[in-house]
Amino acid sequence: QKAFQKAQNSAPPLSFPLVQKTFRAQFGKDVDEMFDSFSRNAIHAASIGQVHKATKNGKDLAVKVQYPGVAESIESDLKMVRPIVQKAMNVSAKELDFYIQEVQATLVEETDYVHELEVSEFMRTNCSAVENLIIPSYYPEWSSSRVLTMDWIEGTLLTDWLASNPSKEAKAKVAQTIWDAFLYQISELQLVHADPHPGNFIVTENNEL
């Protein structure tokens, strides 16, 4: 909730009618046709969207809905900053094209929730050997390029958990899990899927990450 309130300063939350509009555009259905229940107000903020809590067949779900126009604005935003970047970096237009194209491709990929679902499911399957790590399951039938549905996992944001003064043993357990997760990805999978921001980690009541 604190993260959501902070995000409100830069990106106002989507109203429920706009959420409905997104679902109709993505699935041709209203929210209530897809889920048994769906929170009318956002529960958390994401970097380019907001998270609602839903239920389906007795399962608690987190549904991330992207803010409208995010993907479409990337090209125009980069055009605006291009002269500033070129002057700051002191590079030729040809060199700058290379960097701009790379940044644009990466940012567009960030807005593609289908890609995020595929990579996240790959990581969930292939990181099952990491002890004390929980990666939620993702659901393609309730996801699209602008909507991403996964298991809802109860827990406390890492920053809030640390502020609650957990025991030395608990902190060591969580820290070890973070270390093991990254080391396993690098050494065994030879790739890393992570945005290591504290707001992207939660700790369960059993000190699972």
Image: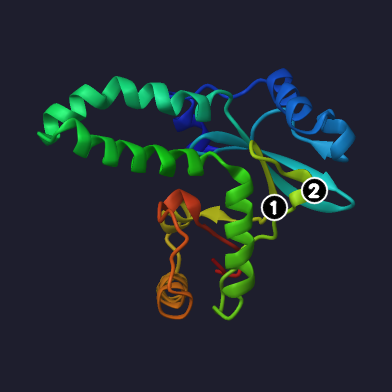
Q: Quadrant of residue 44?
A: top right
- 43 sits left or right of 6 in the view: right
Instruction: For the C terminus, give its image quadrant.
Output: bottom right
Residue furthest to the left in view is: 90
Q: Nearer the viewer, residue 137 or 113?
A: 113
- 92 sits left or right of 42 in the view: left
Mark 2, Cα crowd under 10 Å, few <14 / some 14-19 / many 20+, is few
**Residue indicated by mark 1:** 152
**Above/below status of 146 relative to 179:** above
- 85 sits left or right of 2 in the view: left
Picture residue at 46% right of the left edge, 56% below the top:
158
State how the image is colored.
rainbow
What's under tag 2, amino acid-wise? Glu
Picture residue at 41% right of the left edge, 79% below the top:
187
What's under tag 1, amino acid-wise? Trp
Mark 2 → mark 1, Cα distance in angstroms? 16 Å
Q: Secondary structure at mark 2?
A: helix
Residue 141: mark in rendering: 2
Residue 144 locus on image (x, y percent): 70, 41
Residue 49 locus on image (x, y percent): 56, 34
**Above/below status of 174 relative to 86:** below
Picture residue at 66% right of the left edge, 56% below the top:
153
